[in-house]
């Protein structure tokens, strides 16, 4: 009974504060048993997993639709699997043509976007309809490391990539209807080996990207308005040993999470500083998405995870 009382308290507390973040992490620690971990980065506990038996390759990235409870899981072989992240039920899937390692979802347009995910090469971005899971548009003419992200309050999308001809890192502005970029701005000049990873729009609508460099992890940001990019970029260096799974995702408010190796850094995008660091169970996690202030269905799933933890602790209690 006390366990159920704790669950009820968890639900009430989460509903009243509405600041809980549910993190989804691709777990590639066991080949042939890839899965997606549910993780509470606030209380630092794992809350179950899903995807085993339905994923047939390593996870590259994850995106979420909080309104419908869907998780879009991109694999390194181009397969995309759609799950209910509350229940773990498999919903649908399709296969991309080409090499893609980054995925994002936009609820306003109901579109899934794909980018190359890091490294070098020329891979056009793709846009899929999230309901029909069919190709809606090709974004041509650029190397897009990140999956294009819609700028809040507008109909244009931004991505981050490399102009291989001059080894500059570029932010691009796209129309979601496809075609070549509408405009671009040079972020800075880096060696091509310092590959762009992921990007987010911060709470104050700056486009912020993450990449290795400067003796650690570099985060750059540039302002935007309804028409495009504004001003020049700024760069902050976070001391850390770069890992290939480097990723960034929004939490609630000014909070962002940076995944790097087995570490998750809590980063305040307004203050531009790390607020805390936690260590995960594995350094093999790849791809990260965050459900902010989850809906009641998610809270029930989280409560179920807490109950499972309590039962496990009872079994091992001397």
Image (cartoon, rainbow, N blue to C red):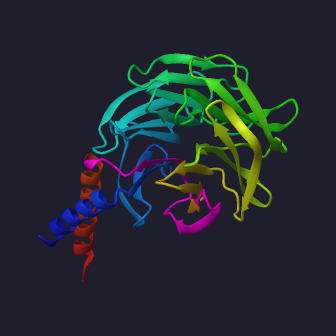
> In front here: 132 or 152?
152
> In front here: 106 or 283?
106
Q: Which residues lie in the magenta part?
A: 268-296
Q: Find residue 90 and report its image quarter.
A: top left
User: Is residue 67 depicted above or below 266 in this figure?
Assistant: above
**Where is the C terminus found, in terms of image quarters?**
bottom left
User: Is residue 229 depicted above or below 287 in this figure?
Assistant: above
Asked if residue 213 lies left or right of residue 283, the reply is: right
Most extreme residue toward the left is 1
- The percent coordinates of residue 62 (x first, y second) are 49, 41
- The percent coordinates of residue 44 (x first, y second) are 42, 66
Most extreme residue toward the right is 166
Instruction: Give the residue drawn at x 63%, y 51%.
Output: 246
Please count the marks in the image: 0
Instruction: Give the residue drawn at x 31%, y 43%.
Output: 88
Residue 295 part of the magenta-drawn span: yes
Asked if residue 17 lies left or right of residue 76, the reply is: left
Asked if residue 247 lies left or right of residue 123, the reply is: left
Q: Find residue 274 and report its image quarter.
A: bottom right
């Amino acid at each position: 009974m006390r366990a159920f009382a704790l669950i009820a308290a968890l639900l009430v507390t989460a509903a009243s504060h509405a600041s809980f973040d549910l993190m989804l992490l691709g777990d590639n620690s066991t080949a042939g048993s890839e899965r997606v971990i549910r993780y509470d980065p606030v209380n630092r506990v794992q809350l179950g997993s899903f995807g085993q038996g339905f994923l047939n390759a390593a996870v590259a990235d994850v995106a979420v639709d909080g309104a419908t409870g869907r998780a879009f899981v991109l694999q390194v072989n181009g397969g995309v699997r759609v799950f209910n992240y509350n229940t773990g039920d498999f919903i649908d899937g399709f296969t991309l043509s080409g090499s893609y390692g980054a995925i994002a979802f936009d609820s306003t347009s109901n579109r899934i976007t794909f980018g190359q995910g890091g490294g070098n090469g020329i891979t056009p971005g793709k846009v899929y309809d999230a309901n029909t899971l069919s190709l809606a548009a090709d974004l041509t003419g650029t190397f897009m490391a990140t999956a294009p992200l819609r700028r809040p309050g507008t109909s244009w999308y931004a991505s981050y990539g490399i102009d291989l001809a001059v080894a500059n890192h570029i932010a691009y502005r796209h129309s979601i209807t496809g075609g070549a970029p509408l405009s671009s701005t040079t972020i800075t000049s880096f060696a091509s080996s310092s590959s762009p990873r992921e990007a987010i729009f911060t709470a104050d609508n700056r486009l912020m990207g993450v990449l290795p460099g400067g003796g650690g992890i570099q985060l750059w940001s540039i302002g935007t308005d309804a028409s495009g990019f504004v001003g020049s970029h700024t760069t902050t260096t976070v001391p850390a040993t770069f890992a290939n799974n480097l990723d960034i995702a929004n939490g609630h408010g000014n909070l962002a999470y940076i995944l790097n190796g087995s570490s998750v850094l809590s980063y305040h995008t307004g203050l531009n500083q790390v607020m805390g660091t936690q260590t995960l169970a594995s350094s093999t996690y790849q791809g990260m998405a965050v459900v902010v202030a989850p809906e009641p269905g998610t809270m029930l799933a989280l409560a179920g995870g807490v109950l499972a933890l309590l039962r496990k602790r009872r079994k091992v209690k001397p």
